[in-house]
Image: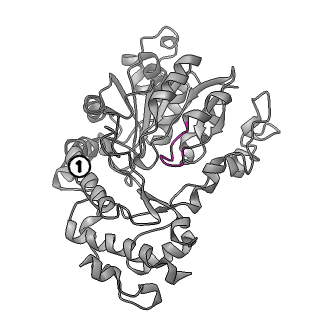
């Protein structure tokens, strides 16, 4: 069937579509069942949305899943990331190192701590923080490195951890895209000093709107708790630096998660391994079907590496226009979508080029917040991170299959293959 479809005239030029069905069963997410509904209803009927009894059970279960000693829930992943930074000792005048190509919550919360960010380059293949571009950016002000497991692909954690230990730095893994992914057989989020992640409704592990911090370091855990969980400080704080301040949040934040999300999270966690496997089977089937097709290259770790993509959040394809006669990415996207495909320019806008990181005086300091508490102008303009800046021309989004139904996925394979093999007709 596939070979016949790929030989037909392109849909964008008036031919038939390669994808003929809606295939809604492939994409529906999150999977919400009567089990989720019952768990949420129990919280609502008990009037305990602002309590913590269900939340503590969720935290304990997630700690067992993640393989860490301490977990702390948050109202969202952004709060979890900021609390992880605070827990790792980031304070006024300090610096973190993070990739520029990521969602803003990886870096922007550092401003609320009076600190700033230095952006480092990414690897073109993994689209994750490049270990080779970290060390020369370290200064006496640097406190943490924040690698992101971008679009599910594990960052290269071994060299990152080696650099961090050499310089006495903490590492915070941003796992928002990669719940359940493995790096050389180890769960991402369990390798650094702490990890933080979003669990909003669009993520592969979805609870509604929530975040989680994971660590084996009690100091990090208690500092994060003290920053925005005032109602839990009396029972949970033990550190002499924190116990005098029990009862009020040090940061003036209210980071508590709504327990309806915790209840849903407990149910989702019970089913996540099997659902994650279905995603991996579907995505790997898609990429195996496109193996060797010019212009399209899988964004996934090498087979046999012990690394996996977890729930494969926001999957993307590397696009190589030079293999398709220089066909611009936008023309490819237009053509594959005319076939019924799901594609777009996939990469985030590089943060180091955004005015918020260059011009905004957020707190009225008389200078851009990025440099307000720094001893130098560390803003990074156009051309300073060329791989990050050029990726939107070389990455496109692909369908995110939540189930593995080969007969249906074959239509998507045919659509992408059809356009790639007839790229010359689009010039």
Q: Residues within 10 Å of mark 1 (few under 14, many from 20)?
A: some
Q: Position of residue 187 (x, y in %)?
A: 33, 33
Quadrant that contains the C terminus: bottom right
Q: Position of residue 313 (x, y in %)?
A: 39, 52
Local SS, label 1: helix
- Between residue 175 and residue 191, name the one nearer to us: 191
Q: Which residues are magenta?
A: 123-130
Quadrant that contains the N terminus: bottom left
Question: Quick check: 410 above or below 239?
Answer: below
Question: Quick check: 394 above or below 185?
Answer: below
Give the left or right position of residue 172, taking residue 386 as reference.
left
Question: Quick check: 202 above or below 407?
Answer: above
Residue under numbered circle 1: 277
Residue occupying the point 66% across, 50% down: 386
- Between residue 257 and residue 49, name the one nearer to us: 257
- Between residue 238 and residue 297, name the one nearer to us: 297
- Between residue 356 and residue 255, name the one nearer to us: 356
Q: How many numbered marks does the figure carry?
A: 1
Residue occupying the point 30% across, 34% down: 55
Q: Does the rendering let one see residue 254?
A: no
Residue occupying the point 42% across, 85% down: 10
Residue 288 shown in magenta: no
Q: Which residue is farthest bottom?
A: 14
Give the left or right position of residue 366, taking residue 388 as reference.
right
Q: Which residue is farthest right?
A: 366
Q: Position of residue 203 (x, y in %)?
A: 38, 51
Q: Position of residue 25 (x, y in %)?
A: 24, 67
């Amino acid at each position: 069937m596939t070979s016949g479809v790929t030989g037909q005239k392109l849909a964008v030029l008036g031919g038939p579509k390669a994808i003929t069905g809606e295939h809604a069963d492939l994409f529906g997410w999150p999977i919400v069942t009567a089990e989720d509904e019952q768990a949420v209803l129990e919280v609502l009927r008990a009037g305990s949305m602002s309590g913590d009894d269900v939340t503590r059970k969720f935290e304990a279960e997630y700690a067992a899943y993640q393989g860490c000693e301490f977990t702390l829930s948050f109202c969202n992943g952004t709060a979890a990331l900021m609390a992880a930074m605070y827990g790792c000792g980031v304070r006024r005048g300090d610096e973190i190192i993070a990739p520029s190509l990521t969602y803003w919550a990886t870096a922007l919360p550092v401003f609320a701590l009076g600190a700033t960010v230095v952006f480092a380059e990414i690897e073109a293949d993994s689209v994750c923080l490049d270990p080779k571009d970290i060390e020369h950016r370290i200064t006496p002000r640097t406190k943490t490195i924040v690698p992101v497991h971008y679009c599910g692909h594990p960052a290269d954690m071994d060299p990152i951890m080696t650099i961090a230990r050499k310089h006495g730095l903490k590492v915070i893994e941003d796992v928002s895209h990669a719940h359940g992914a493995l790096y050389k057989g180890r769960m991402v989020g369990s390798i650094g000093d702490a990890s933080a992640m979003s669990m909003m409704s669009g993520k592969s592990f979805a609870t509604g709107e929530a975040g989680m911090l994971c660590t084996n370091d009690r100091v990090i855990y208690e500092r994060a708790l003290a920053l925005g969980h005032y109602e839990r400080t009396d029972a949970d704080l033990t550190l002499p630096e924190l116990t005098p301040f029990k009862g009020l949040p040090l940061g003036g934040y209210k980071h508590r998660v709504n327990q309806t999300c915790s209840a849903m999270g407990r149910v989702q966690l019970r089913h996540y391994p099997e659902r994650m496997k279905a995603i991996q089977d579907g995505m790997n089937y898609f990429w195996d079907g496109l193996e060797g097709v010019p212009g399209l290259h899988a964004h996934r770790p090498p087979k046999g590496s012990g690394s996996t993509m977890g729930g494969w959040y926001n999957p993307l394809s590397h696009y190589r226009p030079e293999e398709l006669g220089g066909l611009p990415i936008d023309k490819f996207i237009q053509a594959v979508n005319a076939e019924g495909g799901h594609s777009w320019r996939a990469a985030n806008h590089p943060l180091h080029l955004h005015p918020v990181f260059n011009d905004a005086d957020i707190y009225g300091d008389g200078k851009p917040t990025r440099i307000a508490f720094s001893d130098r102008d560390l803003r990074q303009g156009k051309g300073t991170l060329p791989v990050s800046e050029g990726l939107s021309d070389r990455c496109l989004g692909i369908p995110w299959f939540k189930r593995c139904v080969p007969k249906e996925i074959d239509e998507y394979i045919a659509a992408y293959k059809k356009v790639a093999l007839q790229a010359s007709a689009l010039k």
